Amino acid sequence: QVQLVESGGGSVQAGGSLRLSCAAFGYAYSFSCMAWFRRAPGKEREAVAGYIISTGITHYVDSVKGRFTISQDNAKNTLYLQMNSLQPEDTAMYYCAAGFQSPCPVRYGRINEGDFYYWGQGTQVTVSS
């Protein structure tokens, strides 16, 4: 059974940084791509960044480009999201997701919820001004 467990969330002031982690347990070796999503209070869940496991190719939504970096430590089966220059609008619950599609849709700049089968429980990020 596959399980994704996020950690690293917390409260920071605007301009600060956080690094989120997503540890994968189970048949994680079969994933083709992984991603981070977030849901702000009162809003729909939205994509943040995607990662193709076989190539390391990444894709980011415009609002986080240049500030967030998605990466993976294959040996640890862990996905990361380094978040710098955080702003109050980044406040949200952040979710890790994994999928099996081949090719990974991130290749086409697509990060849609429907493309990801496994989800973590989320980790809260709060940015104060």
Image (cartoon, rainbow, N blue to C red):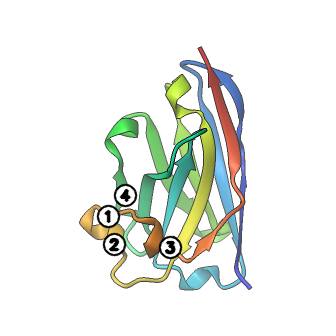
Question: Which of the 4 image quadrants contains residue 18?
Answer: top right
In primary-sequence order, the first of circles 3 and 4 is: 4
Image location (x, y in percent) of residue 68: 46, 40
Q: From this view, report whether residue 34 is shown above or below residue 62.
A: below
Q: Distance between the Cα atoms at labels 4 and 2?
A: 11 Å
Q: Which residue is mark 2?
A: 105
Mark 4 Cα within 10 Å, few/some/many (few <14, many 20+)? some
In which quadrant of the rendered image does the N terminus lie? Answer: bottom right
Describe the element under mark 2 as helix, strand or loop: helix
Query: Nearer the viewer's eye, disc 1 or disc 4?
Result: 1
Query: Mark 4 — residue?
Result: 58
Q: Dividing the picture into quarters, in which one does residue 10 lie?
A: top right
- The three-letter amino acid code for the residue at tag 4 is Thr
Question: For this view, does 124 lie left or right of residue 97?
Answer: right
At horizontal 52% and vertical 55% (from top left) the residue drawn is 36
Q: Is residue 64 left or right of residue 22?
A: left
Q: Residue at x 38, y 62 (%)?
A: 111
